[in-house]
Amino acid sequence: MSETPSSLDQHAAGILLRDVTKRFPGQDRPAVNRLSMDIPAGDMVMLVGPSGCGKTTTLKMINRLIEPTSGQILLGGKDITAANGDQLRRGIGYVIQAGGLFPHMTVAANIAVVPAMLGWDKARTTRRIDELLELVSLDPQQYRDRYPKELSGGQQQRVGVARALAADPPVLLMDEPFGAVDPITRERLQDELLSIHADLNKTVVFVTHDFDEAVKLGDRIAVFAEGGHLVQYDSPERILAEPANDFVRQFIGSGAGLKQLGLARVSNVSPLPVVSATAAEGPQALLAQAVSAGQDAAAVVDGTGRPLAWLSVAQLEGLRLLPAERAPQLPTVQAADTLADALNAILVSDAGSALVTDAKGRLVGRIDAQLILAAVRAQRDAISSVPQPPAAGSPQSPASSTDAGRP
Ligand SMILES: Nc1ncnc2c1ncn2[C@@H]1O[C@H](COP(=O)(O)OP(=O)(O)OP(=O)(O)O)[C@@H](O)[C@H]1O
Ligand SMILES: [Mg+2]
């Protein structure tokens, strides 16, 4: 299946930048300065940094909209300067701010731009358009024939993402794709991108001004400073735990610890045990179980094990019947939720802990604030005990071994 006419196949391709510099004519400082980065195939790498630090220039050098002044860029192991620029770009999806849609073309025609260049037939193109609109949660029936001006900003950005994915390119470059939408739509678009990235094996390079977005989406984050200089290139966990210098620290902003909560999942923590009974078993039975287990609260579950209520021993003592309906404010979190979600659930409930359920909603235990704090500390300690890899382009540090500290 080699539909992409570039030398790349559909599999994710790694990107290697070697000592890449871009000097625009008449500028005293380079826009990008001796940049070396290894972007592994299938990773999502986030470029962050202040305005004018060379993020867009870096993206445009990867798809050869801009030629580097010096240095080398390899895509899937091949030097891109040897490739034909147009062909290269057909194998690289490119999303720019506000979608960058052609205003005089319908949604369908916008998505079909690259398939048309590739000479796909009508049936195949139409199938692909519908498939992509569904992927970005737009009903094809409703949106296929609209013009960009008949869409909201967030919808335009979705179409921009669909268009970039049209020919299933192994590489996706995204330049502040979610910059112009409200925070709620932005979060939804981010979640969609995460699930698309998990499903389709693609290398994504994503530019953002928003450090929280970088932490949420990135396998790695590259922090740039003025003058196109790469300051730190690392996992979000590591950048939060060990910022390379004050510039990075400033860029992270306040609340590095809280941001770490957004990275760890409830499934990373072993939940505390919970005693439970169905409503039919009655309050006395549940109370007896709680007391004998030394617990000061217990859960009521339905026939399939889904939690309905979370009651303290004192509440149980005053009850004749157990509730058979789900309590409206029941604090529950799922294994896939972040520890930030869990802490939030705990803070807004008065129970002091939240019930943890599996993907089917069945009760597996509970989580409290202490457990969350312990998990974040353990995560920080684990990061600090692993030696720092040498920075891109810097000499190998002789003392470090990636296995240090592991049995
Ligand atoms: N075509 C050009 N000619 C001359 N200078 C340019 C050109 N394009 C960009 N520059 C300069 O290169 C530097 C880097 O620009 P670039 O667009 O890559 O920044 P950026 O990090 O994407 O910024 P922003 O966050 O504002 O989008 C800036 O100083 C900019 O003025
Ligand atoms: Mg830019």
Image (tube, rainbow, N blue to C red):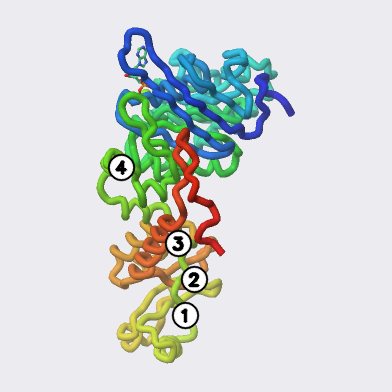
Query: Element at badge 1?
Result: strand
Q: State whether residue 145 appears in this view.
A: no
If the picture is divided into quarters, which one holds ligand 2?
top left
Q: Are marks 2 and 1 in contact (CB under 8 Å)?
A: yes
Q: Nearer the viewer, mark 3 or mark 4?
A: 4
Q: Residues within 10 Å of mark 1 (few under 14, many from 20)?
A: many
Give the mark nearest the N terminus, 3 or 1: 3
Give the mark nearest the N terminus, 2 or 4: 4
Q: Residues within 10 Å of mark 2 (few under 14, many from 20)?
A: many
Q: Whole-percent x and y of residue 333? A: 42, 62
* Mark 2 residue type: Leu
Q: Which sits in the foreground, 289 or 5? A: 5
Q: Residues within 10 Å of mark 3 (few under 14, many from 20)?
A: many
| Residue labelled with disc 4 | 245
- Residue 80: quarter of image: top right
From this view, report whether residue 281 is shown above or below residue 101: below
Give the mark nearest the N terminus, 3 or 4: 4
Q: Whole-percent x and y of residue 320? A: 37, 87
Query: Element at badge 3?
Result: helix
Residue displayed at 36% across by 52% down: 241
Q: Are marks 1 and 4 in contact (CB under 8 Å)?
A: no
| Residue labelled with disc 1 | 276
From this view, report whether residue 36 is shown above or below residue 264: above
* Mark 4 residue type: Asn
Q: Whole-percent x and y of residue 54? A: 37, 24
User: How far apart are labels 2 and 4 at the CA level?
Assistant: 44 Å
Q: How many marks?
A: 4
Q: Which sits in the foreground, 282 or 307? A: 307
Residue displayed at 46% across by 52% down: 387
| Residue labelled with disc 2 | 363
Q: Nearer the viewer, mark 3 or mark 1?
A: 3
